[in-house]
Amino acid sequence: EVQLVESGGGLVQPGGSLRLSCAATGFTFDDYAMHWVRQAPGKGLEWVSGISWNSGHIAYADSVKGRFTISRDNAKNSLYLQMNSLRAEDTAFYYCARDKNGYNFVYFDYWGQGTLVTVSS
Amino acid sequence: EIVLTQSPGTLSLSPGERVTLSCRASQRVSSNYLAWYQQKPGQAPRLLIYGASSRATGIPDRFSGSGSGTDFTLTISRLEPEDFAVYYCQQYGSSPQTFGQGTKVEIK
């Protein structure tokens, strides 16, 4: 059974940093691209960042470019999101999602349950 | 970036009714690379449809997708109690992939 479990969320002050993790089980992790998608409370979905199976293809939404860094460790079956210079508008549930493909990004066939990031003083 | 506009914002319906949700793109969606997701309160989204009309694994056949170019539709042939949720469309034909704002299907 495919499982994606996020961790690392919490309360952080504006300008602060946080690192999210996503532990993947139940599938061959290095066969798939992975993504972070966020959802502000009561709002819609926003794609944040994606990374191909071999980290050779990485992309970011304009809203986080230069502040967030996505990475993966295939030996540990884990996906990460380093978030720096956090702003109030980054407050959201952050979901880890599996891409159907390994390199070119398409749609998301499995999602984690999300971790809440709150940016507030 | 391609903007997806979903309509209506909210639908109030009864179990057993037929539902048609719309997703309109600001530009043509390449290769009809459009997906639909269902999200229930407190849960992660679930993939329903990809490639505009292909059902994901385990999705009941009362869910169907259609459309091409800039206009896409998700149809639920007969609403079941568990279908009351928010539905999102997503295009993945152009970078960055983008989502619609969602349509809420609520119980009348």
Image (tube, coloured by chain):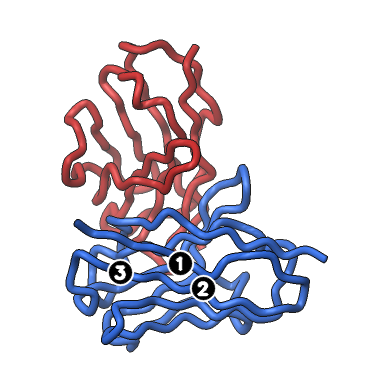
Chain colours: A blue, B red
Tag 3 subunit: A
Residue shown at 42% from the left, 33% from the top: B22
Tag 1–tag 2 contact (CB < 8 Å): yes
Q: Which mark is residue B75?
A: none
Marks 3 and 2 sit apart, C-alpha to C-alpha, by 13 Å
The residue identified by callout 1 is: A36
The tag earlier along the polypeptide, 1 or 2, is: 2
Q: Which one is in front in this view, the residue at disc 1 or the one at disc 2?
A: 2
Q: Residues within 10 Å of mark 2 (few under 14, many from 20)?
A: many
Q: Residues within 10 Å of mark 1 (few under 14, many from 20)?
A: many
Callout 2: helix, strand or loop?
Answer: strand
Tag 1 subunit: A
Tag 3–tag 2 contact (CB < 8 Å): no
What percent of the width, then of the height, locates residue A53? Answer: 27, 80
Callout 1: helix, strand or loop?
Answer: strand
Q: Are marks 3 and 1 on the same chain?
A: yes
Residue shown at 29% from the left, 78% from the top: A77
Marks 1 and 2 sit apart, C-alpha to C-alpha, by 10 Å
The tag earlier along the polypeptide, 3 or 1, is: 3
What percent of the width, then of the height, locates residue B103? Answer: 49, 34
The residue identified by callout 2 is: A20
Tag 2 subunit: A
Give the residue type at disc 2: Leu
Callout 3: helix, strand or loop?
Answer: strand
Q: Quick check: A42 left or right of A60? A: right
Residue shown at 49% from the left, 22% from the top: B106
Q: Quick check: A70 left or right of A31? A: right
